[in-house]
Amino acid sequence: MIAESLNRLGDEGPVEERDEWVKPVREGEPLDHLAPVDVDPTPEWADELDRRLRLLEEMILDERRSRERASGLTRVRRLMKLGFIGAGSMASALARGLGEPVLVYDPELERAERLAAAIDGQVAASNAELADAADLVVLCHKPAQLEQVAEEVGGRAGAVASIMGATRTEALEEAYPGVPVYRFLPNLPAEVGRGVLCYAPGSRAADGPEEEILGLFGRAGVIMPLDEPLLEPAMAIMSCGPAFLALVVEAMAEAGARHGLDPREATRMVVESMAGTAAYLLANGLEPGEMRARVATPGGVTEKGLAVLEDTGLRESFDGAVDLVVETATR
């Protein structure tokens, strides 16, 4: 393959026909009796080979760039360097889901080192150093630290994304004046590329790399743009939702175990049923009520089981949980 490419790059004849470069081995000739090949590395020969190899490398790079352009990831993959301030659970999940070797700073050095090692990233010595090196500063710290972190960044950020709850774009723009701001609320399944990322842009979002950021964050899951006042209700559904659904899994598995099923097998059954149900709903564009109707035969055991869940207050329980989260988040 390399010989063919080199042949196309020059006009001095095929590589395999240049006797001074390669001495052929005759069939059956023992290798241990061969005299060393006498190659004269003259400056002219060496320069010509170097020139051809450089041209070959450029051809390979051009092909790689063409493939990246076709995939729509060129600018994101080559140019955007991410800096995560904070290395907690949600930051770690998002960083893994993005699949980029980000720069990380966290006051707890061990936590920053653990995340950096997991994603082939690097640890910054300070928030200021991180902001100097990053194209996008991603705020993953506690909301109460907003002013302190912004002061440490000291105007070095060129663009800011936030995954903090209960911190509106107005507050972010006040802390980072004149800087494009992008607010996201991701959930834990972002780590495996199946997250939900609710999104509200700041007033200057279009002035910055919004398209590249949305393309990059879209690797972690589905991006759902929302009016900002709806982010807190959304958080109760998609951010707290995995914990609520995990409780449902636990309760169903425990109910099955009480009737003799192995607890691990029962849990696996519920998890696979939940994943399959989600896939079925999406693939067929069904409303939840339509799904229930397909499973529950009139008068059958599924319909009777659904009636028990309704009568014992399943909906009221979810109403109470969501109300509490929204009210707490909007205080």
Image: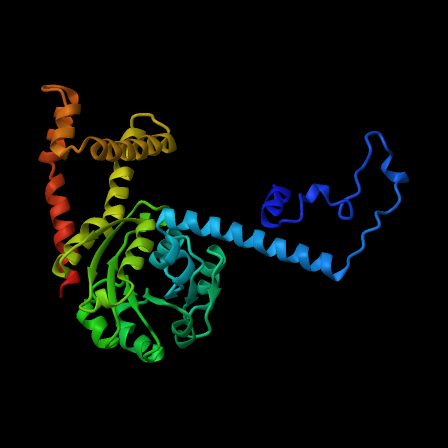
Q: Nearer the viewer, residue 95 or 143?
A: 95
Relative to 263, residue 80 above or below = below
Q: Report how many numbered discs are placed on residues in the image.
A: 0
Q: Residue at x 13, y 57 (%)?
A: 230
Image quadrant where residue 124 sits: bottom left
Q: Residue at x 58, y 45 (%)?
A: 8
Relative to 84, residue 176 above or below = below
Q: Residue at x 11, y 32 (%)?
A: 289
Q: Is residue 181 left or right of residue 40?
A: left
Q: Is residue 227 left or right of residue 98?
A: left
Q: Nearer the viewer, residue 192 or 30?
A: 30
Q: At which x and y percent is residue 123?
A: 47, 67
Relative to 173, residue 283 above or below = above
Q: At which x and y percent is residue 176?
A: 26, 75
Q: At which x and y percent is residue 130?
A: 41, 71
Where is the C terminus found, in terms of image quarters? Answer: bottom left
Q: Nearer the viewer, residue 28 or 32?
A: 28
Q: Residue at x 44, y 52 (%)?
A: 65
Q: At which x and y percent is residue 277?
A: 24, 32
Where is the N terminus found, in terms of image quarters? Answer: top right
